[in-house]
Each structure stands twice: as C-alpha cells, then as structure tokens.
Amino acid sequence: MKRIIDNWVHIPGLHCGSVTLRDVMTHYGYNWSEAMCFGIGGGLGFYYSIRDDISPSHMIFVRGPLMETTFLSLVNKETSWKHAGSDVIDTIKTYINENVPVIIQTDIYYLEYYNSNTHFPGHIVSVWGYDDESKTMFVADNHLEGLKKVPYADFRDGMASKDLSNPLNNNFMEVKLDKPIENLEDLIPRAIRENARKMLQGSSGGRGESGVHKIKLWSEDLPNWKDVSDWKWCSRFGYQVIKKRGVGGAGFRWIYRDFLNEAQEIVPLIKDLDLSNKMNNIGGKWSDIALLLKDISEKESPEAGLLSLASKKAYELWELETEFYSTVIEKIEAS
C-alpha cells in the first residue's frame, strides 16, 4: 500500500524545527512565516556541556529545548513527545492513514541524502507518507525541496539513535489541530515571556540544561580550552553551530529578530521597547564570536590571547541577553 497525505506542504527554509512547524501550520490553513513559528515556539536557548566521552568535548548549542512541543502546546493543546516502540513504522502509518502529519526526531547520520559521517541526533522532519512496496517513508526536510524517501530500516535507526550527544527514543508527535487558535495578539506576548523565563530560570531538554547562566559558564571556561586535546574541533564546532547549521548566521538570534519585526506590527509594545533592534545587535555579536572561533580553529596551536578575547565576547553576550530577557519579563504582560 502507498499513502501520501492530501495537500501535503513543504516550504524549504532555514531551520529544521521551525520549517517543520511552518509546514504543518500551512497544511492546516495558517500561513505563518518560519520566523513566526520559531518565535511562538520560543526557540532561543544556550547549552554548554563538558564531557570526556564525546567529541567535541566542550560543546555548545544555541537553540532552546522543546521548541516544537512548546509551540503546539500554545497554539492547540498541551503536547509532549511520544515514544513509539519497535513498531514505530506501523505507529506512524496509522496517523498517515488518517491524513494526520507526524513530526519526528531523527539523526542525520542515517539519512542517506545527507551523506554525513557525523551523528547529529535531534534533527526534526515531518512525515507525510509511506510506500510498503518500496519500503520507504516520505519526509519533508528543512532546506531540501519536495519529499525525500527514507528506507524503513534507516527510518527506524535514525529515530532510535543512541549517540551520546542526544540519545533518541523513537520520539514523535502527530499534529492534529482540533480547536480554534488564539489571536496572535494574545499568543505573541505569552510566547516572548515564556522564552525569556526559560532563559533566565533555565530549562532542560535532551541535551541538558539551557539558559543564560550557561553563557556565563562558557565565558568563564573558554580560556581553559588551551589545555583541551580536541580544542580545534571544539572551536570549529562552536563556529558551525552559531553560524552555519541552519541557524540564520547568528545562533538563531537573527531568526528571532525577524520574528520580533513581524510581531511588533501586531503588538506595538515590542516596537516601543526596541526589542527587534536589540536582538539584531545581539545577533551581530553572536556572529562576531563565531568568526573568532573559526579563526581559533585554524591556528596551529591554541592561542591564549584569542581564547581570552572569545571569553570577553561571551561574557558581553551573557550581559546583553540577561538584560534583554529581564526587560521582557518586566515590561511585557501576558494574558
């Protein structure tokens, strides 16, 4: 049997999670931009982990945890990741047969169209169909056009990836919008405050704890990278996750700026507080530190002076982001 959901949607974009949310929302008739979906989901975050059993041993990530579930909980109903068993293919096919798209977490290592030698678990794609004859699932994936075929075996392996950086457990969510969505005038302030709260108070996800305090920890530890055996890869990976890997060039901060630009036309207080310009400035400084990390990674040996400069730049980011989120909590009320 072959089945593809009627009126499936895929509009290529920047980031896997926000593209996937935009696709399913468009499928249900809500033509929100990718930036709007990212902002409603509260996509900003920061992780810093130090582990001897993986490489890079000193690893940063710049997106917040649980963006997809936060988004769907705000726009529809309380939502969390479900965990399929060994029958993951049959489980997802059940929803496809009901014309309901499914969001999954996978590992790009198992997606042959990426041809990747590196594990990257937690990658988000939407599932829109299957074909039993060819034993493939049809998925929509971030910047790539159309639907991609993923063999059943690779589909299972990707969803069950046990890579230590972010072990997966057949995580999926069916997306069925079954009640009217609130006006954006009400949703936007709630979403902005919730992201600010998580950044100031901290929140946890598959990669550990996220929050501005982790930026400060990173700043304090950067000078110690001169004594880390894989300092080159730590620096290069940091550059990549801030500048390259579907993050809009500035650790998602410019995607959030674009959200604020749209949002201020709906909620004028955002413009009064100059939040978009402030986030644009923050994004510029994330871009700067990324380029510095790239420079560090290309040196023959770790240079203490450059690592000290990176530390100062990270500390400034901690100050700026703390001020930004504190302003949000103080000035923006949510119903």
Image (cartoon, rainbow, N blue to C red):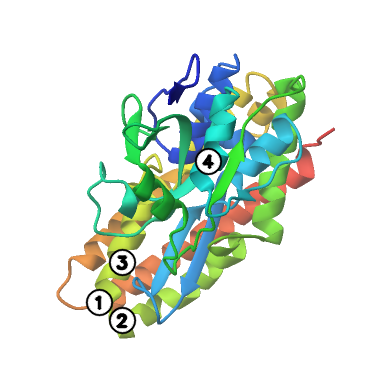
Q: Residues within 10 Å of mark 3 (few under 14, many from 20)?
A: many
Label 3: which residue?
A: 235
Tell me residue 325's x, y (percent): 66, 49
Q: Earlier in the sequence, mark 3 or mark 1?
A: 3
Q: Amino acid at mark 1?
A: Glu
Q: Is residue 193 visible?
A: yes
The quarter in which the N terminus is drawn is: top left
Proximity of marks 2 and 1: CB atoms separated by less than 8 Å = yes
- In the rendering, which numbered label is found on residue 303? 1
The quarter in which the C terminus is drawn is: top right
Residue at 77% from the left image edge and 26% from the top image edge: 186
Tell me residue 132's x, y (percent): 39, 33
Tell me the element at label 3.
helix
Proximity of marks 3 and 4: CB atoms separated by less than 8 Å = no
Q: Nearer the viewer, mark 3 or mark 1?
A: 3
Proximity of marks 3 and 1: CB atoms separated by less than 8 Å = no
Q: Earlier in the sequence, mark 2 or mark 3?
A: 2
Q: What's the distance in space between the residues labelled 2 and 3, CA to CA?
A: 11 Å
Q: What's the distance in space between the residues labelled 2 and 1, CA to CA?
A: 7 Å
- Residue 227 is left or right of residue 331, and the answer is left
The relative height of residue 92 versus residue 298 in the rendered view (above or below) is above
Q: Amino acid at mark 4?
A: Asp
Label 2: which residue?
A: 226
- Residue 334 is left or right of residue 63, and the answer is right
Q: Nearer the viewer, mark 3 or mark 4?
A: 4
Q: Earlier in the sequence, mark 2 or mark 4?
A: 4
- Residue 245 is left or right of residue 82, and the answer is left
Q: Nearer the viewer, mark 2 or mark 1?
A: 2
Label 4: which residue?
A: 90
Tell me the element at label 4.
helix
